[in-house]
Image (tube, rainbow, N blue to C red):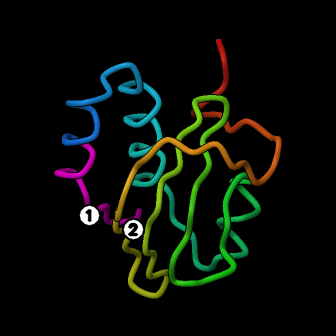
Amino acid sequence: MMRFVGQTEVAGFLAGSPAYDNTVKAWVAEMRSGQWQSATALAAEFQNIDVSALPWVVFYLLPSALRIRTLIDFRIGVVMLLAIDLSAAWHGTQTQPWNKIP
């Protein structure tokens, strides 16, 4: 399991954008329960990410228009949340299990 650092950032974002509560909390749960050994393994599971500037990894949550910027250290298993913001730019077209429209 990965260690997640950034609960304060999550709370701050959700305080101003409560409509994204379920999506962001589901993403956090997925980050905590995952165990990826490399960016390749992460990209195989999440198709809407940018791993081109490791250790920075950017997640694009479709269709919610969220961009989540992180630092990930695969060696020690830590995901550090840097920022959550609304994004108009998309990289990919697949929805993820944790952000599909019901």
Q: Amino acid at mark 1?
A: Val
Q: Residues within 10 Å of mark 2 (few under 14, many from 20)?
A: many
Check residue 72 in the rendering and tell me which mark sits there, or answer none.
none
Q: Which residues are magenta?
A: 1-10
The reply, left or right, for residue 45 in relation to residue 98 is right
In depth, the one of 68 and 85 nearer the eye is 85
Q: Amino acid at mark 2?
A: Val
Q: Residue at x 37, y 73 (%)?
A: 78
Task: List x then y, in percent, for residue 83.
Answer: 36, 57
Instruction: Name which of mark 1 and mark 2 comes first in the sequence.
Output: 1
Task: List x then y, in percent, for residue 79.
Answer: 39, 68
Quadrant showing the N terminus: bottom left
Tell me the distance, in whole angstroms, between the alpha carbons under discs 1 and 2. Answer: 6 Å
Check residue 79 in the rendering and tell me which mark sits there, or answer none.
2
In the figure, residue 72 lies in which quadrant?
Answer: bottom left
In depth, the one of 91 and 94 nearer the eye is 91
Task: List x then y, in percent, for residue 2.
Answer: 40, 65
Q: Residues within 10 Å of mark 1 (few under 14, many from 20)?
A: some
The reply, left or right, for residue 48 in relation to residue 87 is right
Residue that sits furthest to the bottom in the current view: 75
Quadrant showing the C terminus: top right
In the figure, residue 59 lies in which quadrant?
Answer: bottom right
Q: Residue at x 17, y 51 (%)?
A: 8
62 w.r.t. 37: above or below: above
The secondary element bearing badge 2 is classed as strand
Indicate yes or no whether the magenta region holds residue 7: yes
Residue marked by disc 1: 5
Please tell me how many numbered marks the rendered image carries: 2
Q: Residue at x 19, y 42 (%)?
A: 12
